[in-house]
Image (cartoon, helix red, strand yellow):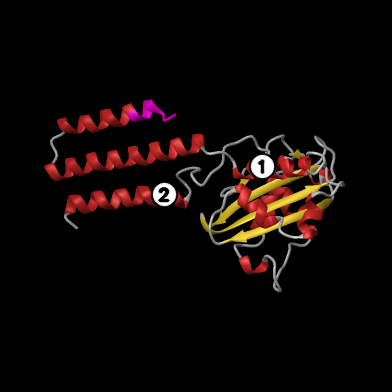
């Protein structure tokens, strides 16, 4: 639901301009600017509140397929999922390094030296990675489609149904707020509640990007600091300035 207190505040601000002795063009432009800010805020606020975390959805699809195959459901470990997000960021947006003849993967030492510290995960609680999926696409796709593309071979099916897995963590993010989009799933045989543990009990949230198990809402409409929304405010400001000065 939209924050109506802010809505009413802006409406009063719009009305208050009537009492100011400003040039007509400037007053009208200010009204337009406030209305634009209100519209963008309401749209973003509504989207944030109703959009689920796509990484959580991917874990749900994985567990549904495992249980349908008579395999056990896996614990969704937020620490492991946060590390999956760091795993993605190690590629620095290079899709060509995902699959194919030029495929690369971060060194195993990165888990303890970089990924865990960036997430606030205790290095001593790291457990072996028993499987991993990685996908890079030029356009954003939803969790079911991402799952179909991640699990598209006999080898990937073997990873999916591996009986050694006990935990899973998934992450998804764009690059610089946009394309390309990466999906990553890490599996582990760690013990729930004792592996991939956060140092202070809370993850170091790293934006942009979403990871599973964090009990938060995550979408491409996270906050004003992200490029996807900032340009809307900047555009509104420039339009208003152009209206005032006749640009």
Query: Mark 1 or mark 2, which is nearer the start of the sequence?
Result: 1
Q: Which residue is mark 2?
A: 230
Residue 127 percent location from the top left of the image: 84, 47
Residue 219 percent location from the top left of the image: 53, 44
Say above or below: 210 vs 20: below
Residue 9 percent location from the top left of the image: 32, 28
Q: Given contact means CB atoms under 8 Å apart, are the residues at marks 2 and 1 in contact?
A: no
In the image, farthest residue toward the right: 164
Say above or below: 56 vs 162: above
Q: Which mark is on residue 1?
A: none
244 sits left or right of 78 in the view: left
91 sits left or right of 225 in the view: right
The residue shown at (47%, 47%) is 225
Say above or below: 220 vs 48: below
SS category of the residue bearing label 2: helix
Separation of residues labelled 2 and 1 (CA atoms):
26 Å
Foreground residue among 162 and 243: 162
For the N terminus, which image quadrant? top left
Residue 67 percent location from the top left of the image: 78, 40
The residue shown at (81%, 49%) is 161
> Residue 117 in magenta?
no
In the image, farthest residue toward the bottom: 101
236 sits left or right of 57 in the view: left
The residue shown at (82%, 54%) is 158
Q: Residues within 10 Å of mark 2 (few under 14, many from 20)?
A: few
Q: Residues within 10 Å of mark 1 (few under 14, many from 20)?
A: many
Total labels drawn: 2
Q: Which is more foreground, mark 2 or mark 1? A: 1
Q: Which mark is on residue 212?
A: 1
Foreground residue among 219 and 242: 219
**Span shown in magenta:** 1-7
């Amino acid at each position: 639901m939209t924050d109506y207190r802010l809505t009413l505040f802006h409406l009063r601000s719009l009305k208050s301009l009537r009492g100011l002795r400003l040039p007509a063009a400037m007053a009208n432009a200010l009204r337009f600017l406030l209305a634009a800010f209100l519209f963008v805020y309401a749209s973003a606020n509504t989207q944030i509140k109703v959009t689920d975390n796509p990484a959580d959805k991917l874990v749900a699809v994985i567990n549904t397929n495992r249980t349908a195959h008579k395999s056990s459901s896996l614990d969704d470990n937020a620490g492991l999922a946060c590390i999956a997000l760091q795993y993605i960021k190690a590629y620095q947006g290079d899709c060509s390094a995902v699959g194919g003849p030029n495929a690369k993967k971060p060194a195993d030492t990165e888990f303890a030296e970089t990924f865990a510290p960036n997430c606030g995960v205790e290095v001593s609680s790291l457990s072996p990675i028993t499987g991993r999926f990685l996908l890079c696409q030029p356009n954003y796709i939803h969790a079911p489609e991402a799952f179909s593309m991640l699990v598209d071979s006999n080898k990937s099916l073997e990873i999916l149904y591996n009986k050694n897995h006990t935990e899973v963590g998934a992450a998804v993010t764009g690059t610089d707020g946009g394309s390309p989009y990466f999906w990553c799933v890490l599996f582990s045989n760690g013990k729930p509640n004792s592996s991939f543990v956060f140092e202070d009990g809370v993850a170091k949230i790293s934006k942009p990007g979403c990871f599973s198990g964090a009990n938060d809402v995550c979408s491409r409409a996270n906050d004003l600091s992200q490029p996807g929304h900032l340009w809307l405010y900047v555009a509104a400001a420039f339009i208003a300035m152009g209206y005032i000065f006749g640009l």
